[in-house]
Amino acid sequence: DKAYQTPDELSERLARNQQLLLKEESHFDKVVDPAAGSYYIENLTVSIAKQAWDIFLKVEDVGGFYAAIKSGSIQKDINESGKAHRKAVAQRREILLGTNQYPNFIEKAGDKKPVTSCPCCSQEREKDVETLNFNRMASEFEALRLETEASGKRPKAFMLTIGNLVMRQARAQFSCNFLGCAGYEVIDNLGFDTVEAGVEAALAAKADIVVLCSSDDEYAEYAVPAFKALNGRAVFIVAGAPACTEDLQANGITNFINVRSNVLDTLKEYNAQLLK
């Protein structure tokens, strides 16, 4: 909880207990060196050392660390690296457990507010240099959940599961995790025999979002009838990237979520639409 408040006695005790569990139950203090002589580890170490040396020489070429700071080259390199990292987090190519993957659906911030990060230089010091981006990688996802919570309206996302059992369950789980990252209430289902029954159940649940979860092959059969039956009464999403995507788009279906989606940008769009 350090990002939201000064750690208290409970949080410090939990942090100590984690170390004790690793020591006493996982025996992390009783190991040999399993990486000794490993080509992968040795090669990776040499690669990191070489890149670090190249950066050092680059800094020296411009006159040293202070000159590099004044020119902004160090800040530029760090910020560009951070930008790439944040994009990977937004697309879930890098996982922040509990933030962009497997969120806690019932968690609430309450009165807690994120601690604002700021540059280490005080206001009395010179400001004629470019600063670094100090935002944590999780901050934008947290802002989504805080926006949802502050709105007082928690959108409901209904999983309309139909067709192939394995694929509908997999797509529902994926969609629940996807939409849960914004703090939405997700309603999963065991499955429906017909599209009409699924849409009727979604409307009865007063869903703001209906996610069609099925197999790629079956979307050609189910998607358009479900979209028309819903008739604009909720945001309609297809979970996946089926081969018939162009045909579905031609029928007015525009929302698709899949492993290639930018989770952060997609959820920002849904928040803008649903939290008006």
Image (spheres, helix red, strand yellow):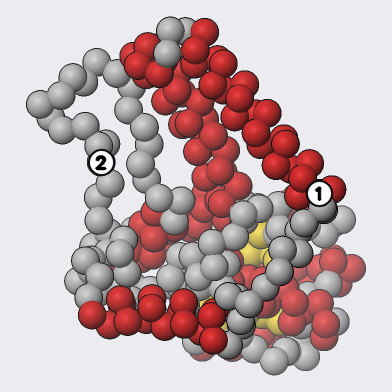
Write down the residue under mark 2: 118
Q: How far across and how far down the image is residue 100, in percent?
A: 54, 62
- Determine whether 200 is above or below 127 in the image: below
Q: Residue at 28% x, 46% y: name it.
A: 117
Q: Position of residue 176 (x, y in %)?
A: 59, 75
Q: Is residue 232 above or below residue 125?
A: below
**Residue corresponding to mark 1:** 40
Nearest to the observer: residue 269 or residue 177? 177
Where does residue 187 sit, x and y in percent of width and height?
55, 84
User: Is 221 on the left or on the right of 225, as rendered?
Assistant: right
Quadrant location of the C terminus in the rendered image: bottom left
Instruction: Name the kind of residue labelled 2 in the image.
Output: Cys
Q: Is residue 229 left or right of residue 132?
A: right
Vertical side of 58 occupied by 172: above or below: below
Q: How many marks?
A: 2
Label 2 CA crowd tier, 10 Å (few <14, some 14–19, many 20+)? few
Q: Amino acid at mark 1?
A: Tyr
Give SS at disc 1: helix
